Amino acid sequence: MTPTISCTDLEVTLPGASGAVNILAGVNLSVAKAEFVSILGTSGSGKTTLLRVLGGLLPATGGEVRCDGTPIQGPPDGVVTVFQDYAHSLLPWRTVRRNVALGIEARLGRAERDERVDEALTMVGLLERADEYPWRLSGGMQQRVQIARALATRPRVLLMDEPFGALDAMTKASLQDQLQQVQSLTETTIVFVTHDVEEAVYLSDRLVVLNGSPADIGLTLDIPLPRPRHQISTKERADYLELRHRVYEALGHTVGEPARG
Amino acid sequence: MTPTISCTDLEVTLPGASGAVNILAGVNLSVAKAEFVSILGTSGSGKTTLLRVLGGLLPATGGEVRCDGTPIQGPPDGVVTVFQDYAHSLLPWRTVRRNVALGIEARLGRAERDERVDEALTMVGLLERADEYPWRLSGGMQQRVQIARALATRPRVLLMDEPFGALDAMTKASLQDQLQQVQSLTETTIVFVTHDVEEAVYLSDRLVVLNGSPADIGLTLDIPLPRPRHQISTKERADYLELRHRVYEALGHTVGEPARG
Amino acid sequence: MKAKKERGGTPIRGLLPLVALLVIWELVGDPASPYFPPPSTWIDGIQPLIDADKLLPAIGQTSLTFVLGLAIATALGAIVGTLVGASRSVDRALSPSLEFLRALPAASLVPVAALVLGYTTQMKLVVVVLPATWPILLTCRTARRTLSPVLLDTPRTLGLSTWHRTTKILTPALTPAVLLGVRVAAPLALIITLLVEIVTRVNGLGAALGAAQAGFLSAQVYGLLTIAGILGFAVNWIVTRAETSVSRRMRGTV
Amino acid sequence: GGQDAASDDGDPRTLRIAHNSNAAALPVQVAMAEGIFDKHDLKVEFTKVENIGTLPGTLGRSFDIALSVPTTVISAAQQGIPVTQVSGATLDVEDNPTGFVIGSKTSGVTDIKQLAGKTLGVLTETGTTHVATKAWLKQEGVDPASVNIVQVDGPAQADQLAAGRIDAVETVMPFATSVLADDNAVNLGDPYLKLAPELSAILWISRQDWASSNAEVIADFQAALDEAAEFIAGNDDKARQVLKEYTGLPDPAIKAAVLPTYTTEVRPQDMEIWLDAMREADGFDGDVDLNALVASQG
Amino acid sequence: MARRINVLGAAVFVLALGLWELLVRTSILDFAYLPPPTVVAQGLGELVSSGELGEALGHTLFAALSGWALAALAGVAAGSVLGLVRPVWMYSMASLEALRALPIVAFVPVAVLLFGFSVQTEIMVAFYAALWPILLNTISGMRTEPRMLESGAVLRLSRAAVLWKIRLPGATAMIVVGLRLGLSVSLVLTLVAEMVGNPAGLGFLLVEKGQALQPGQMFAAVFVIGVTGIILNALVMGAARLAFRGQMASSGEVSS
Ligand SMILES: Nc1ncnc2c1ncn2[C@@H]1O[C@H](COP(=O)(O)OP(=O)(O)OP(=O)(O)O)[C@@H](O)[C@H]1O
Ligand SMILES: Nc1ncnc2c1ncn2[C@@H]1O[C@H](COP(=O)(O)OP(=O)(O)OP(=O)(O)O)[C@@H](O)[C@H]1O
Ligand SMILES: [Mg+2]
Ligand SMILES: [Mg+2]
């Protein structure tokens, strides 16, 4: 089976203050349909860059990126990126509702569109703020509007860049579970950038760590935890704790890992 | 002793889609010199709003805000806010170095300024990117530039809005410890908004939770853990785990809390 | 997304359509036409002015008023535009009066200005500055209003003085808008400069233009218009260059 | 295009006439008001155009007959715009001058010779009055280049002179009246009369081809104007009422107005004087066929 | 949405008029040519009752607004193309810049030749003058925040939809500025065209009343022109607030 999204020998060079800088080199990654892959890595390692290349927003300077087997030029149909930079990605002149409708309003009738928007806004807990302008929302709320906008399109592939970064633990947990549920229902393929190791292990089928400069994939780890997963019971499992431990180790720190009683 | 920064019966009303909305009501908080207070709360509860009022950036619609006993009008001297929206707070036409110098260049001679900037950039691990423009940096890097800019001014009071939100665990831990060290050396008063309960407990002398709508302070918890604290040993202490547990409970969830073997 | 190589200013090759137009005019134009003489006759048209040593001083006079007027308008427009953009009450207080002033035709202001200031460069400047200020003021006002609140909070929390807030944050952040306003204002300033000179015949290209028009010297009229056009184009080109280089540095925000 | 639009109007007996708020055009207005044109089987459509300098180019397109001045006619003709005089309008004579150069005691200009180095406000720098003034200056041994010239709109002249923004002013009626109303103002003389004791400075023009194919109409036009001039001479009150209506001048100005001496005579000799004056004073070096500038008398 | 009458602005305006009256009354500004507001008001009354004002105003408004509307269509369309299609910009912008630099006033006599003494002359002049601010502001407004464009790309919006839903709304604040500038410029140049060319409308009224030594009426015409400027601008802003609610709100043009 061809992977849904993949890159081979990916190389990306970006301009820098003192000439071009090689950001990614020799990155190979392929993500199968309905797979959930998380990307971890230190700040500035190139996670966002990789996601932008996979989403067709940045052309690779070397190697190949394919979606469903065909090399991509520009964002492919059904592949939606959720940006780390949420503040810039919402349209300030549209209300929350109309921001969420942006990706579907041309394709769907009024009724279905409204239904999808309401559904998406309910998922992220912002239905009652639907008629507000985004610049009147808190950071975490804006981030959730962007997530709702992506979910409303029912994408085949979802590329998410620290989507829950600005959320409190409660809201985050709830959205994690929503996302899991959506994925199991619709078989969405998800590539997920996060700094939260717990989150990565809890959500993923597979987890890769970007490191080095230029960065490549330093560690790939399968997470064979049974699904559906639960915030309490899954996180209590010995294999979950074991996996989590291995990731912390791979990230090179013993410190950040919460102590185990 | 007068508290360094305090608010009494604070009320804040902001415009919304359907008229003015009462965001904060009856918030009482006072932070003593050299104290480290964390603010937690769900997304949209009003943490950023509270911080903006304390920093003199947003006038209260009711109640009183004082700094060193005098009611504030506008940002008081030596009180520096680190914004959640780091992307908008860096000047795109200045290099990283000149962004960090912004707060001190008028006050200090060239030599001392350069020294301070280098020191601050070293702290956040971005010295070698000093001549880059901020829009060429990753999200986490931009956030660190903003932190460096605040630290370079050697503030008396530091108001930080999810300053480590976009950072990976390693970088975050290192910055947490840098911040602790700075505080113990300079007796900086710190108010710190975060979603990370571990982080809040690890860093704070006291921790408050904002909740309700309009929001007020729902829980205040002293964190009498001995200082200096260490990423490993402190987090292994029974009282740390106990406190952490209480916070999770207060935030109303049993789920997000990592299981304890 | 593609890494384009941007050079400063508007590419000169963009003049091709205009050149083509002039060539066609030259080819089909009737050299004896009293209204549309072909370009080749224009130089002959202004030759008498060159011979009489009148052309260069006229260009100098007009340039002085035009450039100085534009400079004053830029300063005024930027300052008032920023104030009006920052404060809603200042905006509401000043806007109607300013709207009133800017609709007034320069030609009816000239006699009034001349009464107060005489037939001097100052009088020309007053009449030129008023309409030229507008584009800069309005563009600057809108840009000021759309600045991110966080960007404005930054210097406040860092304790920057008002002066430094203005020079270090507002000025660079609003420069692209001001330059856009200047681009719009430049031809206006030039038009009004010429108009004042036509009306008063106070030294300058406009005075020569008015005289040429009254004498039905159409080749000379086109010749003078071309010179005025080149003047406007030159100033505009400089401003466009500045704008491109500024917005390139500002790429993070645009 | 449209160069040969001379006869694009069907009925040659409909005259499209344009002039400004000048007392020189009073006979046309009176002829309209008193039905004199009708009597001569002429239908007149009138348009008021204050800036008559633009008119030569519009003849044959928008208008058939327009008020003009000799300098304009000569310049236009020299540039290939085929205009010709079809009728005289007014005549300057010693006891009824229409042109004025007015100095100011406060500026120390009480004689034309004192203009050197001073600022003179003029109506149009290229106009008839100014050409005449320059010729006059030369006659008096003053280099016209030594006089600083600015163009001042008629209505503003009185204030400008009183405020000392200009030291002297060159003007016509009705502005001369308000300029002279100031105690400091000194009338230095009529520049036209310095060129010749009797001179026409305002006239009616048309396109040459129109004039040559409508000689009869022109003759009728002139006859109507002559009749109107007679009427004016005999009915001062009615004439002034008409003047008030088309100029809009306030009552005092109407009352004080000295009406010019009207004539329909086409005076080729005057055209020659003007051409000489332009050559002499203005450096005009064009080659003009004066014969073409005067329509053959009908 | 309901905006109150701008009392503050009206007060400043009236204050300025009062100051002018005072200066004249105290003979600090004593010119027959520049009458005090009371005399201007009287002249205004005369112009209104004679019916001249209404007709002139109608004529001028028709010419200025027609030219402006055409310029708005052409300016936004051409501005969009120039802002988006780089080759077009490269191969024509400099020509436009050069044409733009040409002083339109000097062309009024030529326009009179081409179109005769007609309202078309005025419309052409108004169009030409209003075109440039609208064009330049549109081009400049088309520089959209890249992240928003990426959002459009990611959501698979068609090129037309990106233009229509992201670029143009993003440019709206700037385009409205261009429209406001264009409006006043077209008004002013219509007046110039009437003063030196087509003898009709407020511009001609102004000249005519000046020549007729009626400064009160002349400045009444000037006053009406200024007030027309205020009203037209308020109308454009009001229409923009109605039509582009979100854009106006996000660019701070709607007070909350
Ligand atoms: N627009 C750009 N131009 C040039 N260099 C860039 C640009 N964006 C990012 N970079 C550089 O590319 C590198 C990787 O950046 P990227 O944003 O991919 O990191 P990241 O892993 O997402 O980091 P973070 O976790 O902090 O978001 C960084 O060194 C950054 O400076
Ligand atoms: N500029 C504004 N205008 C109007 N309302 C606002 C504005 N900014 C924030 N709000 C509202 O105030 C409330 C609190 O926002 P605030 O940004 O303080 O939340 P927060 O606790 O910081 O949330 P987060 O954790 O998501 O950043 C929210 O309901 C938000 O919609
Ligand atoms: Mg990133
Ligand atoms: Mg917040």
Image (cartoon, coloured by chain):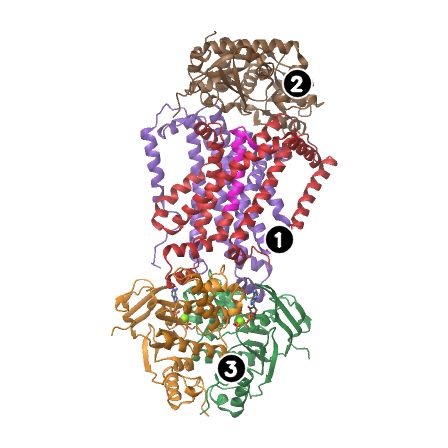
Chain colours: A orange, B green, C purple, D brown, E red
Instruction: List the residue tagged with mark 1.
Output: E3
Q: Which residue is painted at 49% across and 26% down in the image?
A: C211
Instruction: List the residue tagged with mark 2.
Output: D241
The chain letter under disc 1 is E
- Expressed as whole percent of the image width and height from the top left, the position of residue E138 reads 45, 49
> Is E107 above or below relative to E88?
above
Label 2: state its secondary structure. Answer: helix
- In space, the residues marked 1 and 3 are separated at their CA atoms by 47 Å
The residue lying toward the viewer, choosing from B28 and C153, is B28
Q: Please provide the residue range marked out in magenta.
A: E179-202
Are the residues under badges 1 and 3 in a single subunit?
no
Label 1: state its secondary structure. Answer: loop
The residue lying toward the viewer, choosing from E29 and E50, is E50
Q: Give the amino acid at mark 3.
A: Val
Q: Give the amino acid at mark 2.
A: Gln
The reply to whether discs 1 and 3 touch (Cβ–Cβ < 8 Å) is no
Location of ligand 1 given as a quarter of the image: bottom left
Q: Nearer the viewer, mark 3 or mark 2?
A: 2
The magenta stretch spans residue B160: no
Residue B197 disc label? 3
Q: Give the amino acid at mark 1.
A: Arg
- Expressed as whole percent of the image width and height from the top left, the position of residue C210 reads 50, 28
The reply to whether discs 3 and 2 touch (Cβ–Cβ < 8 Å) is no
Q: Quadrant of residue B58?
A: bottom right
Q: Nearer the viewer, mark 1 or mark 3?
A: 1
The chain letter under disc 2 is D
The chain letter under disc 3 is B
